[in-house]
Image (cartoon, helix red, strand yellow):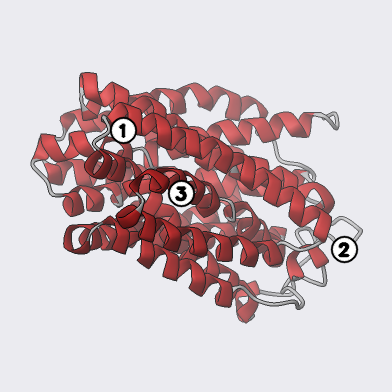
Amino acid sequence: MVRGSRWFILGIAVVAQIASVSGMLGVPFVIPELRDAYHLSTAQAGALAGLPSLGLLLTLIGWGVVIDRRGERFTMTVSLLLTAGFLMLLGAADSATGVGVVLLLVGAAGGPVNAASGRLVLGWFAPRERGLAMGIRQGAQPLGMALAAAVLPLTAAHHGFVVAMLLPAVLALATVPFVLLFATAPDRSPASGGDPARTANPGSPYRHWRIWRVHGASVLLIVPQFTLATYSLVYLVDEHGWPAPVAGAVVAAGQVPGALARLAAGVWSDRTGSRLRPVRILAAACAAALLLLAGASTLLPGAAVVLLLVCLVLSVSHNGLTFTAVAETAGLAWAGRAMATQNSLQALGSTVTPLLMGLTVDGWGFPAAFALAGVFAALAIVAVPGPGRGAAGAARWSAT
């Protein structure tokens, strides 16, 4: 395969991730229709929106083993087909409980695309350009959410919740042929040059605390990310009186620079030789912005909308860096399981966050929820490990 084709493979990984994300994480953008259709409170609808993440949590470790043993192409194909099939079952659900079961299955099916496509990119790109490549690939999450935010509220407003959620199913099915034809793995023989992702591991990276601290920081940063992902549209509708399609368009506008921020963060990490120092800086910026948003929501509502967009960008900018650091620390032999573990732990955070923040909104309002999310971002600054050697070897890209 020619050298330039690895960028085409990266493009396939991005499209597959967009399809998966728009299905699993699209529910928050139709919460108003979900509340009306099943007579739910904000907290109850938020809990339903978190169920795909619970499905993710329950199955991802098993999917990680499948990725390492059967490969990325097989896993991505099966995942996309199952995701589309389960989304189509929403039409048969006649109660909130039925919808919840289907959304749980959607999350269980859709999770491995992230880890599998990440492992695919990890294998094709060398350390000095991997931050950029993984930043582009991780940019698929905010792009998928931008697509969902732009299209799903408008569709749901005219055709209802079920029809809106069929759109990600169609995208997933359309992506499958490209995955089957082009998502080929690189030569997996050990490479020279000290690449931590290819160096053979003497054993499990989970014998070392470093990888656990990266996981922990990621989980803490998931709280502000999913607070904003779940409730930004609801905040604009309930507190500012915006129509849901307009609010969805604004949230979508915030996701596009979020994707670019992930790319920029990847380039930043490549040039500085550190994945995790930028994470600390981004976590601090996110914490400060969320606390300002909490205050502005009460005192300066007009400024709050601008701050909301800033927080949307900052809250997603770290993800590619922590994902890459986990994979490089684990090494290629453990990459599928390590990235699946990363996603599983993040899924735990994204499952609990909608319910926790829904209860906070119902009890104390949106400013309290934004302030609480800022506290979690501040805790992540402490959790990020300092300079040191990663479990997979001495590579400056994963060690600092």
Helix, strand or loop at disc 1? Answer: helix
Q: Is residue 91 visible?
A: yes
Q: Nearer the viewer, mark 2 or mark 3?
A: 3
Q: Residue furthest left?
A: 39
User: In the image, is 286 to the left or to the right of 169?
Assistant: right
**To which residue does mark 1 refer?**
87
**To which residue does mark 3 refer?**
307
Q: Amino acid at mark 2?
A: Gly
Give the image location of residue 258, x and y in percent.
56, 43
Q: Is residue 77 visible?
A: no
Q: Earlier in the sequence, mark 1 or mark 3?
A: 1
User: Is residue 270 placed above or below 384 in the rendered structure?
Assistant: above
Q: CA distance from mark 1 to mark 2?
A: 43 Å
Helix, strand or loop at disc 3? Answer: helix
Give the image location of residue 156, x and y in percent.
25, 26
Q: Amino acid at mark 3?
A: Leu
Q: Residues within 10 Å of mark 1 (few under 14, many from 20)?
A: many
